[in-house]
Amino acid sequence: MADLIKKPWLLVVTIGLGTLLNPLNSSMISVALTRLQEEFSLTFSDASWLVSIFYLTSAAAQPVMGKLSDMFGPKRVFLSGLVLSALASLLAVFSPNLIFLLVCRALQALGSSTLFPSGMSMVRSHITQGQGQALAGLAIFSTTSAAFGPSIGGFLISWWDWQAIFLINFPFIAASFLLSMFVLPNTGRMTLDLRRIDFSGIALFTVSIVSLILWLLSLENETNWWPLIVCITGFISFYTYERRKHEPFIDVLGLKRNYNVTLIYLQFISISLVYYTYFFGLPAYLQQARGYNEQNTGLIMLALAGMSMIIAPFTGKLVDRFGSKVPLLMGASTLTAGTALILTFDDQSPLLWLITIMIILGMSSGFNNISMQRALFEQVNQEDTGSASGLFQTSRYLGAILSSSLLGVFFTGTINIEQLHLVAIVSLIFCAIVLGLTLRLPGQNNTS
């Protein structure tokens, strides 16, 4: 094993095959929602829970799994995550109803959420030279699987059915598990300290978010106010509890002290909300309003997700030269322009025009993701990088959760162009927030 560890690329491949599961499974579902609506006789708001439950579980689980990795050793946690992901994927294939499938999606998110923090721990500990290249390699696994997830999912559903998007996990799980047995370093002691895990904070956070989702989805018909009351009460209780916690789930006092960082998280939530609204909404529109099958829909979605990958290297150079603000202004501008152009698209518009709009929206993602992370690092101390990065991921998850709720409110019945336009109008409001927050960002900080 010692000889194998000396080969960093093998360690990166082993971890990468596991860490790609979370972005792959969060993206493949985008082209499967329409088929799952048909299978289980669901409304779009019902089906949107398949998106929300995955991101909500991921948001709550990743910080916990990082601490469990410290307690039990990253290799044990990594292998356990692979086993849980395999079990969840297998059970999902036999789902008889939505509730069962939701449980499987939650377990799938829980299992895949163990892989990134434990994998990162091993990279930081066992790759001392070329660590930046190793992290870039892991990023390639994640971004590629997220970008090609809709295309892979569309092909699999056309080839077989929705169950295939769960079975496709097994080759990656098997390869990562076998390699992990021989490649991953066996470090860490079995020391369980439950006091380090903020179960109460996680519970209050989860109840608050679920209540918010329930209230938003109730706007579709007759508004229910009790979920909003529970949500507000939950967030107040969460803040009061977390500010007294030694190892909080979310460091609310730190957010209060560093106002710029708080606004960066708010900006990233808004960016993610708009982007994921199109990432999950456009496949449903293409299938239900334009009549494209899952395979063609997945290919069309490459214009959105693939463009992000093309722009990302260019953004990296911009960030190195100008800092975060210049590329973020480009990202905010293309996000706003793409959203406004959605309003020019109608049922008579050619597909090429929609693809052009999707390319512009994809460019915004390529500009925003790397630049937002750099903006965060420009405002936090080096020793706070780990916790700040965790909250950065949580912001992404919150944006995705809110996007699925937004779609659940407006996508009622058979999806049509008027509903897509309403979604774009609401998205324009968040684009304005993104643009305003980008303009108020300080310039390049050379102390980052």
Image (cartoon, rainbow, N blue to C red):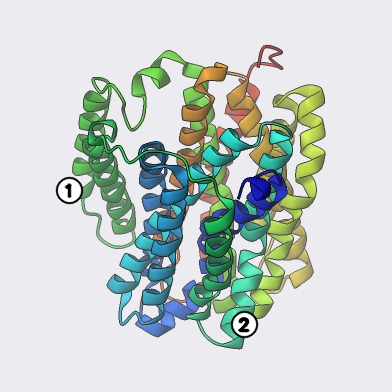
| Helix, strand or loop status at disc 2 | loop
Q: Quadrant of the C terminus?
A: top right
Q: How far apart are marks 1 and 2 (CA)?
A: 40 Å
| Helix, strand or loop status at disc 1 | helix
In the rendered view, does 42 fall on the left or right side of 82? left
In the rendered view, does 33 fall on the left or right side of 53? right
Question: Which residue is nearer to you in this view: 388 or 330?
Answer: 388
Q: Position of residue 355 (x, y in %)?
A: 75, 64
In the rendered view, does 144 fall on the left or right side of 289? right
Look at discs 1 and 2 and give the one toward the viewer: 2
Q: Position of residue 102 (x, y in %)?
A: 33, 67
Question: Which residue is nearer to you in this view: 44 or 252?
Answer: 252
The residue at 54%/60% (across/down) is 21
Q: Which residue lies furthest to the bottom in this view?
A: 160
Say which residue label 2 marks.
293
Q: Which mark is residue 226?
A: 1
The residue at 43%/52% (across/down) is 55
Q: Where is residue 142 in the image (x, y as percent from the top left)?
A: 62, 52
> What is the three-letter code of the residue carrying label 2?
Asn
